[in-house]
Image: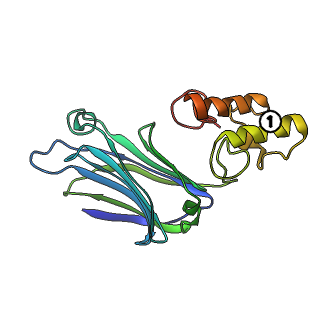
Amino acid sequence: MMRTVGSFEFENGFILEANTFLADTEGLSKERRLSWYSDFANYVFVRYDQVVEQLVCICVVNEQWLFNETADIPAAEWNGSDQLWHKLSIELLGDHLMVFRDDILIFEHFDSAISQMPKIGHIHLSNTYQQTCFDDVMMTSISGPAYICGDANADQTVNVSDAVYIVNYVFIGGNAPDPLDAGDGNCDSTVNVSDAVWIINYVFIGGNPPCDTNGDGIPDC
């Protein structure tokens, strides 16, 4: 069964989410797909396939495959055995793509081409047999500046050069991050040397990503 929910427009990015349920139906493949597309040349989707017990994410912009990854999720964690709905979320902001299962970050990708995704498109739902499988489908447009938290020098990546940029800004009068919030790596509403330290810890010793103060994989500011 395939269903297009409707046409939607977003500004700098969007959050697309829906609760999904894999009913315990004997002998039938249990697959769910949630996608945003404008045409076959521009789309992003996330799909759980119980046959291979994997969550898949694919992102294509202007016929270029930017992202195609899988993550193992055992059927015992997501089918009729737990009798729970689980939320799938696709978040796209500027050059940043994230996919969540419930509140757990599964996929993350940065690519400058992502920002070229057309701003008008459709939500598409599909499953492999005739049964209600989606609930609370919601599309939220994200407004405001499209920036990556921790990307102080605006090169669309977070690395040691962002820490150097912050140090130069704080100590020797270098240019400020633009927007300033992009340099607030520890989410304390100021930009100072502690943000540079946060980024260094993230890059070199596996610390939390910028703005992820509680370690759940989701930026907190």
Q: Position of residue 45 (x, y in %)?
A: 39, 57
Residue 58 appears in the figure = yes
Residue ID at (77%, 50%) = 178
In the picture provided, is 87 more to the left or to the right than 97?
left
- Specify the quadrant that holds the N terminus: bottom left
What is the tally of numbered marks visible in this picture? 1
- Left or right, 65 with reference to 134: right
Counting from the top left corner in percent of width and height, residue 124 is at 38, 62
In the rendered view, does 190 fall on the left or right side of 38?
Answer: right
For residue 39, which quarter of the picture?
bottom left
In the rendered image of this protein, does residue 125 appear above or below residue 188? below
Quadrant containing the C terminus is top right
Q: Nearer the viewer, residue 202 or 54?
A: 202
Residue 207 x/y as whole percent: 57, 28
According to the picture, the residue beneath numbered tag 1 turns out to be 167
Q: Where's residue 7, x and y in %? A: 47, 68
* Residue at 23% from the left image edge and 34% from the top image edge: 76
